[in-house]
Image (tube, rainbow, N blue to C red):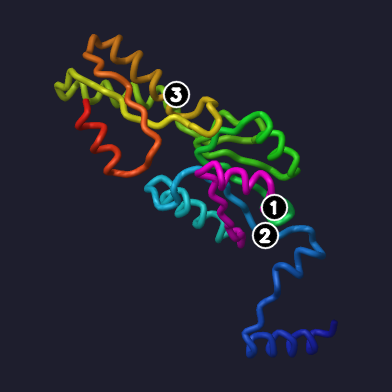
């Protein structure tokens, strides 16, 4: 294309506020410039808010969009793994706060895209994982509170009722129990709940 013709096309596109269709470009390139994220937590929670903020900072610089799928209930989970909406609609998948059954892990792997887990180090199909050491973090929290003079402790957390697989709760519970024994503190028990929200936490604290 001649330079003069190219300049005319670019000028017209600017005047018309023309934006190239990513969907159309994907047909030719095979790339969607879109990252999918599968989350099991409430999207309004503090953790997800921080995660979204960090992802936006990085993905927007690379000109990627983010599409979020939530699998926080049996129904949502079945819907995702039955339809696989991210398949061919994204270039990669981020899995957050998730434990998967062997069958679900095989299904994710069959999508044939890079998968990275955030705070989900127990999923076998991921090529990479970013997570803190939950066990060490919980032990550190117990030591800190003990240094402030606290002697009676309880641990309140959630299991994963959808899979029965290990996830962050189990590691944190181990760190809690081991540190309580190590420091000779009083263990008032581990309390498990399935609902999410402040009112649920208040109810459990009043029971202890």
10 Å neighbourhood of mark 3: few (<14), some, or many (≥20)?
some
Q: Is mark 2 on a helix, strand or loop?
A: loop
Residue 186 lies within the magenta run: no
Q: Mark 2 = which residue?
A: 33
User: What residue is at 51 percent from the left and 52 percent from the top?
Assistant: 55
In this rendering, position of residue 19 left or right of residue 59: right
Residue 176 found in image quarter: top left
The reply to whether callout 2 and callout 1 are in contact (CB within 8 Å) is yes
**How far, Cα to Cα, is label 1 from label 3?**
32 Å
Task: Read off the magenta span.
Answer: 62-85
Mark 1 against mark 3, which lies toward the viewer?
3
- Rendered image: mark on residue 157: none
Extreme left residue here? 149
Residue shown at the point (51%, 57%) measured from the top left = 56
- Residue 175's place in the image compared with 55, above or below, is above
**What percent of the width, then of the height, locates residue 119?**
50, 36
SS category of the residue bearing label 3: helix
Q: How far apart, in angstroms, are the residues tagged by discs 3 and 2?
A: 36 Å
How packed is label 2: few (under 14 Cα within 10 Å), some, or many (20 or more)?
A: some
The residue identified by callout 1 is: 91
Eyeballing the image, is 78 above or below 57? above
The residue at the point 63 percent across, 47 percent down is: 80
Q: Residues within 10 Å of mark 1 (few under 14, many from 20)?
A: some
Residue drawn where x is 80% and y is 64% of the image:
27
Q: Which of marks 3 and 2 is nearer the N terminus?
A: 2
Q: Residue 170 carries which label?
A: 3
């Amino acid at each position: 294309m001649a330079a003069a013709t190219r300049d005319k096309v670019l000028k017209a596109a600017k005047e018309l506020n023309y934006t190239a269709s990513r969907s159309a470009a994907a047909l030719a390139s095979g790339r969607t410039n879109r990252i999918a994220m599968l989350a099991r937590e409430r999207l309004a929670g503090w953790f997800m808010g921080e995660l979204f903020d960090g992802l936006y900072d990085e993905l927007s610089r690379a000109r990627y969009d983010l599409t979020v799928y939530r699998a926080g209930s049996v129904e949502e989970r079945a819907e995702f793994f039955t339809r696989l909406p991210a398949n061919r609609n994204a270039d990669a998948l981020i899995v957050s706060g998730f434990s998967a059954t062997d069958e679900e892990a095989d299904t994710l792997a069959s999508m044939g895209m890079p998968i990275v887990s955030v705070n989900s180090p127990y999923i076998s199909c991921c090529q990479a994982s970013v997570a803190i050491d939950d066990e060490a973090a919980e032990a550190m929290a117990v030591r800190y509170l003990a240094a402030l003079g606290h002697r009676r402790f309880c641990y309140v957390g959630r299991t994963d009722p959808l899979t029965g697989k290990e996830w962050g709760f189990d590691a944190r519970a181990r760190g809690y129990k081991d540190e309580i024994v190590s420091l000779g503190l009083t263990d008032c028990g581990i309390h498990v709940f399935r609902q999410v929200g402040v009112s649920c936490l208040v109810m459990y604290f009043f029971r202890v």
